[in-house]
Image: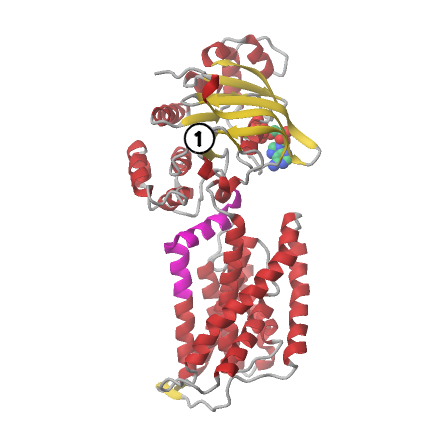
Amino acid sequence: MTPVNNPNNKILDVQNLVAGYIPNLNILHGCSIHVCVGEIVTILGPNGAGKSTLVKAIAGLLSVVEGSIELQGKDITGMETHKLVREGLGYVPQTENVFAKLSVAENLELGAIHHRSSMAETREKLYDLFPDLARFRNLAAGKLSGGQRQMVAVGRALMASPSLLMLDEPSAGLSPKLTQVVFQQLLKIRDSGVTILMVEQNARAGLEISDRGYVLAEGVDRVNGEAQSLLHNPEVGELYMGGHGKSTMENVVTASATSENSTPGDSA
Amino acid sequence: MMQFVADGILNASLIALGALGLSMTYNVLRFANFAQGEVLAIGAYFALGAVTVIGAGVGVMGPVKFGWPLLVSIPLAIVCTSIVVLMVDYLVFRPLRNSNASRITLIMAAFGLSLMGRNLIHLFAGGDPKYFSFYIPKAIEIMPGVKMVPDDLAIIGLCVFAVVSLHMFLTKTNMGRMMRAVSENPTLARINGIDLKMIIRMTWIIGTALAVTAGTLQGHIFQAKAEMGFDMLLPMFAALILGGVGNLYGTVLGALVIGLAESFAVYFDLSAYRAAVSFMIMLLVLLVRPQGLLGERE
Ligand SMILES: Nc1ncnc2c1ncn2[C@@H]1O[C@H](COP(=O)(O)OP(=O)(O)O)[C@@H](O)[C@H]1O
Ligand SMILES: [Mg+2]
């Protein structure tokens, strides 16, 4: 059941990525990660570490200064964002990830603009997975609650039948209970054959459903390993605390849970 | 009195078409296209050219004096004007977009193009007004005391048809949905696989089509002259802002208010202040509802 980290079966391979928003001001300074087919991989790290920047760069929203990105064996470095859907990449940004003025059904249809023929079928499967989407299909997505909106965002990305789904903080703004619901659905999505790469602030909950994880700090991948081992790795705690405490992730989770009620907005 | 309402509605339908074009380009390209007036005028001249070549007075249908040549000239003019507009976008606006020019830079560029457009019309077509035809239309009584020229009625009908078509396009077609998606969140639209460059081209074409239709019909009722579009700029912007920038239904409502206001200015013998009246109404409404009639508060 649990897929192994088989380096011969990489769906995504990011090598020494250097990228940023403004010329000569790089945020990522040589970041390398990979994801194998069937895995759930979580990217952790303190606020401002560059996690969102990394997924944006993979999604073609930033210009890559150095390094390479391969998706399913194909070099996609510098490829325009709108072409990546057809390469099998799904991406749910951290903020503003639904079209608030459009109905739920329209949001889903927009997810499938390059997959018109299988649209009805995919949508039915999606309605089975997220019954709320069917219930609210005619409502403007902006009128939904945070959890429901997250489902619209994920559903929209799934409408293109991606091979790899990237999620930036899918639990942001959700209660611990709702987070569990969303994560259980992510497991189902993985079991239906979609590989998942996600960014997560909620380290413990994220690692619990993950196979592997990376810890980013200051734009570099500092630690990586099996999800379970990361939970007990003191080095991970130090990175989170900015090098001060020598706590394990167990302590960090409680510490960060209190300071993270408001997720900072992401202006991109 | 009712006569002025009828005239106001005719005026409003022409303003609405032009303002909707403005609204479309604003929503997707994020700047106020001050050259929209010249798009309208250039379109009218292309249509005039087509009608002249086909032969005015040919194909008259029933009581309506414009025949099929006018109806044929509109799509022809739309194609020709779109080519001009897309070329201008490629040469002027595209480089500005790529260098992340500010909104004000884009507006100033549009201003410059507007001036240039008017001068080019003067250069090629001369300064005096041109007429589509020289017949004297006969008004018919549509209600007791309200007379309208059949052509005007047909033109109102055409405008309503254009507005309804635009609504259907935006809500029922895949391309229309993609345009609304881009206007709300361009980044998320790209993530969904929407090619922004293609949507920008489509937006210019639709904005042009609406302006050219307005210009041609206006030219048919009155005359074609280089300033015809520039003179429409204030009412078009008033309608856009009054209705709530970005809201297409608000734009139609705004056009109706401005059209009627201008018509009533004539009724109360204030025709000299026509433009000022629509401006005053716009200011008054904005004092009470800063977001416009149907606009949403940010
Ligand atoms: N749109 C932007 N323009 C410029 N700098 C940005 C932008 N978004 C984020 N940054 C900067 O990039 C760094 C990493 O941010 P981000 O990747 O969002 O961190 P996180 O790991 O919390 O997701 C931060 O220093 C942030 O200030
Ligand atoms: Mg982030």
Quarter of the image where ligand 1 sits:
top right
Above or below, A165 relative to B105? above
Q: Main secondary structure of the magenta part?
A: helix
Residue B15 belongs to the span the image colors magenta:
no
Q: Chain of mark 1?
A: A
Name the quadrant of the N terminus of chain A. Answer: top left
Residue span colored magenta: B163-187
Q: Residues within 10 Å of mark 1 (few under 14, many from 20)?
A: many
Asked if B114 appears above or below A30 in the picture, the reply is below
Residue A99, horizontal then vertical, whole percent: 45, 44
Which residue is more in the foreground, A178 or A111?
A: A111
Q: Position of residue B261 (x, y in %)?
A: 51, 74
Return the residue at label 1.
A165
User: Which quadrant of the figure contains the C terminus of chain A?
Assistant: top right
Q: Is residue A187 visible?
A: yes
Whether residue B258 is visible here, answered yes or no, is: no
- Report the side of A177 relative to A74 (left or right): left
Is residue B167 covered in magenta? yes
Q: Quadrant of residue A162?
A: top left
Q: Secondary structure at mark 1?
A: strand
Q: Is residue B37 above or below residue B138?
A: above
Percent coordinates x, y for residue A44 in the rendering = 53, 21
Q: Nearer the viewer, residue A14 or B142?
A: A14
Quarter residue A244 falls in: top right
Residue B255 image offset from top left, x and y in percent: 49, 68
Residue at screen point 51% across, 57% down: B203
Q: Amino acid at mark 1?
A: Leu
Residue located 42% across and 26% down the image: A195
Beta carbon of the mark 1 residue lies under 8 A of ligand 2: no
The residue located at (43%, 47%) in the rendering is: A101
